[in-house]
Amino acid sequence: MSDANPSRLSRLLAMVPYFLARPGIKVSTAADDLGVSEHQLQTDLEQLYVCGLPGYGPEHLIDIQFWDGYVSVVFTAGMDRPLRLTGPEANVLLMALNMLSETRGAVDADAVRSAIAKIEEAMGTTRRAVSADLPAAPAPPVDGVIRQALEDGQSLRITYYTASRDEVTERTVDPIRIRAVDGNSYLEAWCRSSEGVRLFRFDRIESAHGTGEVSQPPVEALHRTDPTDLGALTGELPTAHIEIDPEAVWLLEYFAAEPDDELSEEPTEPITATIRYGSPQWLARFVLGFGGRVRVRSDVDGVTSLIASTAKAARSRYGS
């Protein structure tokens, strides 16, 4: 008996050729082979009664008879052997698998490479996928720790770099699932310090280790249907009003900043804008990086004094 637990759809697709090759097989034996209970097998067989060819009259439907604990196939409706991929279907699947293999942490890389090799062998191709030929690069240690924590249902203690705040924090999280978005892998988890669902990008998790505690995210977090906002992974960001000299207006295209007034042409005078920032430290470094061409118009989170103290500390390093 196999330890695999196929989905009901894949089981139904394979069931007709399975019984066709084993006429008069016992229900109990078939249930063991297919890894289901006898009750589930009977439910599956009853489902097959209403499957068949277009037209869906009695003469078009799959006919499987089972009585006194035995099963036989009378009419297969063309499902005489397990379904096989067509050439175009296999090529599309190979493209998807190769993309997955390049997405860190989203899947088991060894399993993907094995699937690629098996599909190409089944297709009888003369070439081999580059990713299947080259030795696999070792995955970063945190990837395995995260995947193992998900499998074991264990909470994690992670060290995480938040780009929007330009800071590194320690967090205890309850893993929910791994998501692949725009070529990046994210751990979706309940963050205990933020008390909410957050996404943690794999390549920004500097370290991770299991806590030994059972992962227990709230029920509503496990069954949420709304997509997690990738634009605010750690909550809504505050805003600040800044003044920008004409030669630095280009920053509006690269940072989360919006001009207070519509710009009809290249400005010749300083303009004002609203910018989102992750932390006062990040905002201070941002302003200082423009060498006086960007200024904070209102003191938020004490950033004005922070800018002054940071600049003073920087100048002192160059003192005699």
Image: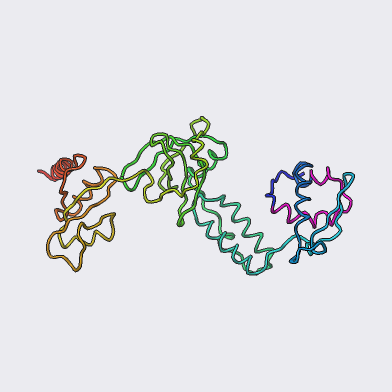
Name the main secondary structure of what is drawn in magenta.
Answer: helix
Q: Is residue 65 left or right of residue 227?
A: right
Q: Quadrant of the image for the N terminus?
A: top right
Q: Position of residue 91 (x, y in %)?
A: 61, 67
Residue 264: quarter of image? bottom left
Pick the front one: 291 or 86: 86
The region drawn magenta spans: 9-31
Residue visible at 61% across and 59% down?
A: 116
202 versus 156 height, above or below? below
Residue for point 56% across, 52% down: 109
User: The C terminus appears in which quarter of the rendering?
Assistant: top left
Provide residue 265's location: percent of width, then percent of height: 19, 69
Is 24 inside the magenta-drawn segment? yes
Q: Identify which residue is drawn at 23% across, 52% down.
A: 274
In this rendering, would 312 be left or right of 126? Answer: left
**Residue that sits furthest to the left in the current view:** 320
Tell me where residue 147 appears, x and y as whole percent.
53, 43
Residue 120: x percent and y percent? 65, 64
Compare residues 20 and 154 and report the one nearer the observer: 20
Is 83 covered by the magenta stretch?
Answer: no
Taking the view exactly as shown, the residue that stands out farthest to the top is: 213
